[in-house]
Image (cartoon, rainbow, N blue to C red):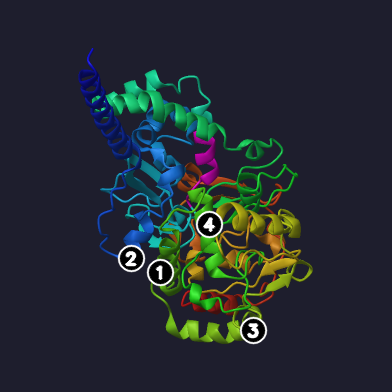
Amino acid sequence: MKKGNRFGWFKKTLVVLVVLGAVGGFTAWYKFFREVPEPAFATADERFMYGSISGENEAGLPYWIYLVLPRMFPEYLPGPGGYASLGLPWEPGHDTPIGFTKKTVGFPRVSQTCAVCHTASYRVSPDSNPVFVPAGPGHTVNIQAFFRFLKKSINDPRFNSDNIMSEIAMVTDLSWIDRLIYRYALIPITKQRLQQQNFDWMEREHLPPWGPGRDDPMNLTKYFMLQMPEDGSFGPADMPSIWNLDKYKPGTSLNWDGATSDPRSVIIDSALGIMVKPQRDFKAQIDWMENYLRKQPAPKYPFAINAALAGTGKKVFDAQCASCHASARTGHSVPIAEIGTDDERLKSWNKQAAIKANQVVRDEKRVTRRGMVEETLTGYVAQFLDGIWLRAPYLHNGSVPSLRDLLTPPAQRPQIFWRGYDVYDPVNVGFVTQGKDAERDGFRHDVHTRANGNQGHDYGTHLPDAEKNALIEYLKTL
């Protein structure tokens, strides 16, 4: 071959290789990394409930895998109805429950947001539609059951490319390249990543389940983010309301036990628990979330209020409750010896864990924040009571069904009740927790099991019934 011909052949080959490389690079970017902006949301509430916080980038579940898992493994769910059986709030017309986003980053992905645990729902009667309240405590959501469903599904031998592709083919017609991507990349990678998550600490046989509306927040931090060894602690706690964060002035404490003293730090840490690591738009997402939650008002009580009785109740409140819940003490820790409630939550966190958590966020997550309190926690925070009517069941571990029960001596409070049912009880101010419907849809809470005790906080239990009734009526107005 002549030199000129050899050079021409080399140049053509190089051009072909460059073109193929460019096509391959573009295809890889388009199918795995291309980020499609979300459509504009009609309201800030809608953005909070469905808007991405960039958790899809690394922690997102491929949409079609997410969709078919309940069809493939219904036996690993609490009951019929797919994801709805997990108590997830779900509005008609949406592809995902509230608190789950669907966003295209190369391919459609599903991820969680803060709203999955922080959207309250209630019904005014058994035959009415649910009302959803963003930034409220998600008292119906069974997060532990969701984790267990994922763990059992991905460890089932049926979780393989052949079976999953067959199920996906029943609901959509993927392109040939998407079929290849799912079969040889997304399904194996999804299985591998989920198997790397440490769910084993949740399966200690001697411990009761969390139940709906609760998680074990400090242990989630220790075992998921910090990879600390299992230490035997167990501190389930109710999902808190996160509306009106402006009420937390400098020096006040957040979380049930005062583990953090800065609203922005709480938002950042919660987001990092979903994201794995911060994305390029992390600060903008946090800025929006913080501004939204600072200004989001507590919901108004939806039933009639006896104004005269509430006025009388205000006087009872000022005499009996205000010293903790409407004073300089509000937002500060009350020693456990004084309040007398279940102390297992306090035992699940310590100074060393806080120091390590702050170090990990600084070094691995590369985020600047005020951080968690690096000291031993000795009590529970005296709560602000805005929207208290929608925050049942009560105490940090949700062991008291209603405000009326909370004004009853601990020994006389319900010992067994069903939590997670969403029909509201305006008489006792809480949710319906007894009866066949509550037993069918709810979760049995036994106060005799570990970390579920309903003792303590016996303030106001000595009041005559007339003053209790007036106090409860006033609490509806907050």
Confirm or deny contact between disc 3 and disc 2 (CB under 8 A).
Answer: no
The residue depicted at 36 percent of the width and 31 percent of the height is 68
Residue beneath disc 3: 328
Type of amino acid at the residue the image marks with label 2: Ala
Q: Earlier in the sequence, mark 4 or mark 2?
A: 2
Alpha-carbon span between mark 1 and mark 3: 25 Å
The number of callouts visible is 4
Tell me where residue 182 sits by quadrant: top left
The residue depicted at 43 percent of the width and 67 percent of the height is 287
Q: Residues within 10 Å of mark 2 (few under 14, many from 20)?
A: some
Q: Earlier in the sequence, mark 3 or mark 2?
A: 2
Q: Nearer the viewer, residue 344 or 4?
A: 4
Type of amino acid at the residue the image marks with label 1: Tyr
Image location of residue 67, percent across then percent down: 35, 35
In screen coordinates, is 326 left or right of 112? right
In screen coordinates, is 343 left or right of 413? right
Image location of residue 199, percent across then percent down: 60, 37
Mark 3 vs mark 4: in front: 4
Start and end of the magenta stretch?
140-150
Q: Give me the disc on residue 292.
A: 1
Main secondary structure found in the magenta portion: helix
Type of amino acid at the residue the image marks with label 3: Ala
Q: Earlier in the sequence, mark 3 or mark 4?
A: 4
Confirm or deny contact between disc 2 and disc 1 (CB under 8 A).
Answer: yes
Type of amino acid at the residue the image marks with label 4: Ser
Alpha-carbon span between mark 1 and mark 4: 15 Å
Q: Earlier in the sequence, mark 2 or mark 1?
A: 2
Local SS, label 4: helix
Local SS, label 2: helix
